[in-house]
Image (cartoon, coloured by chain):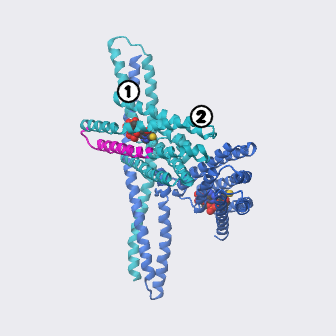
Chain colours: A cyan, B blue
Amino acid sequence: DIKAIDQQWKVLDSEYQTLEEGHKNYNNSIVEFTKLQNKCLKDITHQNYRISQLKQLIQKCVTNGEEEERLKEDLLKQMGSRRAHVREIGESLPKPNGLYLNIVLGSINATLLDNEQRFRYKEQYEMFKLVVTSVILVVSLLDLIFQSRVCDAVLHFLLVWYHCTLTIRESILVVNGSRIKGWWRTLHFLTTVLAGVMVVWPDGSSYTKFRIQFLSYICYSSFLQFLQYYYQYGCLYRLRALGERYDMDITIQGFHSWMWRGLGFLLPFLYFGYVFQFYNAYTLYNMYTQDVSCVEWQVPAVAALYFAIFLGNTLTTSLVIQQKLTG
Amino acid sequence: DIKAIDQQWKVLDSEYQTLEEGHKNYNNSIVEFTKLQNKCLKDITHQNYRISQLKQLIQKCVTNGEEEERLKEDLLKQMGSRRAHVREIGESLPKPNGLYLNIVLGSINATLLDNEQRFRYKEQYEMFKLVVTSVILVVSLLDLIFQSRVCDAVLHFLLVWYHCTLTIRESILVVNGSRIKGWWRTLHFLTTVLAGVMVVWPDGSSYTKFRIQFLSYICYSSFLQFLQYYYQYGCLYRLRALGERYDMDITIQGFHSWMWRGLGFLLPFLYFGYVFQFYNAYTLYNMYTQDVSCVEWQVPAVAALYFAIFLGNTLTTSLVIQQKLTG
Ligand SMILES: CC(C)(COP(=O)(O)OP(=O)(O)OC[C@H]1O[C@@H](n2cnc3c(N)ncnc32)[C@H](O)[C@@H]1OP(=O)(O)O)[C@@H](O)C(=O)NCCC(=O)NCCS
Ligand SMILES: CC(C)(COP(=O)(O)OP(=O)(O)OC[C@H]1O[C@@H](n2cnc3c(N)ncnc32)[C@H](O)[C@@H]1OP(=O)(O)O)[C@@H](O)C(=O)NCCC(=O)NCCS
């Protein structure tokens, strides 16, 4: 009956008043929030600037007497730890996007403000890699079976898209404080170019000769991606637990022993992958120098790309291991 | 002298205390802000849900007497305007990213919270289109002069990348409340596929026959993009002024007359572009049916794509004009 509905409407009306008020508060809190954020950012810049200034002054300063010497050392130590604190505070503030993200996304704020969100974002990133790699594996297996050039093209475009997307996501991770090495991001650019060159490689004897080896390599590197997922997901999961619990010493030790077991398992497969990359470069180089029917420019180009990838991967992984051993 | 430096350090120390406090306030304001945001979102969902419920009840409700009839109409009108208000409140709240952005970016919050930021984002988007289109124009002119297949490949990849990036940016615009028609976003997907097919089109008689026409088309559509930039930037600029000033009636009229002059200038060039697209489809269709040397599957594929693009563009633009004339 219409009167009863009118009553209900009145109730809803008062609820709407609450919403309007809540919205006003919300708008005020945006303003407040932005103000505080800008103030923090300014203060951080100021601190960093003054610390480096004072540090320079101290280093130039001549001390006489033991007391002054002690004061000097003390000050330098304090400045070091202050730097670290300021950096920590900076972690919860938005960071500039960097050139690549600015070009692709424009000035969208890509900073996640709390640790829980960051963990979840990293988790999604690992999941995304797992899912797309599975698709790539299936397509390349189908392609090995059915040998169709259209299927080849689909695979190549999929690879281009996958690595392009990863560069975007990894740039976002870096904005959010990930210490991912520059090489792994460069690698995606190289792999994108590689897939692009594969796309324009005309059908011919050189393409046919390299085709099976290329597909096998893609299958192997998808398999490698699964192993990496297992390792990275394990690290992430344990790091998150570490951040939440409080018996730090035990868990950090536990984390390290887990990490080394994971690495011990992963590394042989990784290095085999790098040997495979070198072998690809070698095969193509041989085709280029010895086989007169291989006239396409794609042959030396892909060879050079594989060699660069092999070199960068081997050096970076070895360096990471060395750092982990000594650090 | 070290004592003086120590003094300065003490000053900086007290400034650091301020920063720490400011950071604590900032963290609190994030919590507060998130809480208010969630409350608004929940209240909005509740309002929308209740309004549709009551609306259904009213429509089923039988009235007797003029008074009740009037009450009913009044309530329906109130509900309509309430809906609009609730939608307006929702504009300043983050919206879900949609499937495409979730795949490419993951769950990064792509909502810009105030209108000024949104205008700036749109401005950057128009600027981005202008700059990349200029590059495309230069590359395609160089390609017309030097006739190199490598230059072709660079152009095709540039087109793939450009339209891919636009789909991302336009998805972000839509999240931020732009009413851009679905077709213009679909168009970028189609154009990306088209450029992809061009990339894998093997060198041969059919490719050579279509090449000059394709390059001329790219030049013309870059030119068209410049005109569109002029129009869209003008609209944007005037809409922003409209939002800031208060003599609404005059400026809205001024906006409309400017818009129609802009459209009057732009439309003939647009429709000529659509005719060009149809002509591309027609040329390729002819090649496919009449020329026995054109055996590549790319010929009918590109023809079909151009025809789809021609059709969609013509229909959408005509519809938009018709809506503007009647609305
Ligand atoms: C060697 C390896 C196992 C070391 O992993 P790790 O223990 O996580 O190394 P680091 O301590 O240097 O990691 C620093 C950060 O970079 C990330 N990271 C390391 N390697 C990465 C990779 N290949 N891709 C993406 N992110 C990576 C880590 O997750 C970590 O992130 P965080 O700062 O957000 O916690 C790892 O780098 C790896 O798997 N590399 C092989 C990659 C490869 O060869 N790919 C080509 C296959 S053919
Ligand atoms: C016909 C046309 C001039 C109308 O422009 P308009 O007056 O802005 O149209 P609308 O009122 O429908 O615009 C609604 C929104 O969509 C945006 N928009 C319209 N056409 C767009 C397009 N082609 N690309 C991107 N955004 C577009 C507008 O900027 C506006 O954004 P806002 O909500 O953030 O303010 C415009 O759609 C156009 O230029 N179309 C031609 C595109 C074309 O043919 N491209 C292929 C070239 S070969």
- Asked where in the image residue B41 lies, by quadrant, the reply is bottom left
Residue bounds of the magenta highlight: A220-248
Residue B162 drawn at (x, y percent): 60, 49
Whether A230 is among the magenta residues is yes
Residue A261 vs residue B27, the one in the foreground: A261
Residue B85 vs A293, above or below: the answer is below
Q: Secondary structure at mark 1?
A: helix
* Screen quadrant of the N terminus of chain A: bottom left
Residue A58 visible in the current orientation: yes
Q: Which numbered dot is residue A290? A: 2
Q: Quadrant of ligand 1?
A: top left
| Residue A55 drawn in magenta | no
Label located before the other in sequence (1 or 2)? 1
Q: Residue at x 30, y 36 (%)?
A: A256
Is residue B64 placed above or below B58 in the rendered structure? Answer: below
Q: Are marks 1 and 2 in contact (CB under 8 Å)?
A: no
Residue B110 screen position, x and y as percent: 49, 52
Q: Which residue is mark 1?
A: A80
Chief secondary structure of the magenta portion: helix
Three-letter code, disc 2: Gln
- A249 displayed left or right of B93: left
Quadrant of the image for the C terminus of chain A?
Answer: top left
Q: As rendered, which of B69 and A317 lies closer to the eye? A: A317
What is the quadrant of residue B170 in the picture? Answer: bottom right
- Say which mark, if any, is on residue B135: none
Q: In the image, are marks 1 and 2 on the same chain?
A: yes
The chain carrying label 2 is A
Mark 1 or mark 2, whichever is nearer to me: 2
Residue under the image location 44 percent in, 57 percent down: A24
Kindly identify the amino acid type of the residue bearing the numbered disc 1.
Gly
